[in-house]
Amino acid sequence: MKEIASGRYTAHIEGPFVVFILGMRINRFWAFRKWFAVVKAMAPMMKELYTHPETGFLGGRSSLTPWREITVIQYWRSFEALEHFARSKDSSHLPAWQQFNKSISPDGCVGIWHESFLVADQQYEAIYHNMPIHGLAAATEHVPLRRKGETARQRLKQDVVPSTSGRW
């Protein structure tokens, strides 16, 4: 079990970064060979990324939703780094993607998806209270919350005055 960091912490990273969320969904459980091929292709990609930080990959985590979905959250130094990995003939991703499109995608037994978020410098908030080092803080730097400010507005460096309706 991971050690709990007692207290309030945040993540710290200088400059912009990318949050990349991807996943797969098993649409036909009995098409085991097809969806297992997709699951199996992920391990070499993740190993490649963790052993080659020069790719711009900062870190990430995977989670399994019971029965149907796997979700991966990744943090990247830049969109260019993410795109280079995805399209490079030297990475494990491109052949896996081509194989998926050729033999798995057409019948719809497995669905895949992704979302990319480009985060500007200092335009993020992350709070971890009595948690193991987690998420963005595990991929970057885990620091005491007070270092970035006591309120969400301070941490996001927002000078906007809230509306009188109580909504932001």
Image: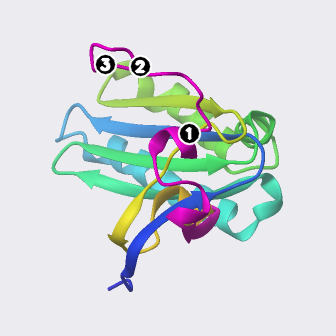
Residue 37 rendering spot, x and y as whole percentages: 42, 48
| Magenta stretch in the rendered image | 140-168
* SS state under label 2: helix
Q: On screen, 145 above or below 150?
A: below
Q: Quadrant of residue 116?
A: top right
In the picture of the structure, the residue carrying the numbered disc 2 is: 106
Left or right, 19 with respect to 131, comes to: right
Circle count: 3
Magenta run includes residue 158: yes
Give the number of the mark in front: 2 or 3.
3
In the picture of the structure, the residue carrying the numbered disc 3 is: 167
Q: Residue at x 45, y 47 (%)?
A: 151
Callout 1, which amino acid?
Answer: Phe
Left or right, 110 with respect to 45, comes to: left
Q: Are marks 3 and 1 in contact (CB under 8 Å)?
A: no
Distance CA(mark 3)–CA(mark 1) = 29 Å
Distance CA(mark 2)–CA(mark 3) = 45 Å
* SS state under label 3: loop
- Residues packed near mark 3 inside 10 Å, few (<14), some (14 to 19) or many (20 plus): few
**Where residue 20 is drawn, which disc sits there?**
1
Q: Quadrant of residue 122?
A: top right
Q: Are marks 1 and 2 in contact (CB under 8 Å)?
A: no
Give the number of the mark in front: 3 or 1.
3
Q: Earlier in the sequence, mark 2 or mark 3?
A: 2
Residue 57 rendering spot, x and y as whole percentages: 70, 54
Q: Quadrant of residue 104?
A: top left
Callout 3, which amino acid?
Answer: Arg
- Residues packed near mark 1 inside 10 Å, few (<14), some (14 to 19) or many (20 plus): some
Q: Earlier in the sequence, mark 1 or mark 2?
A: 1
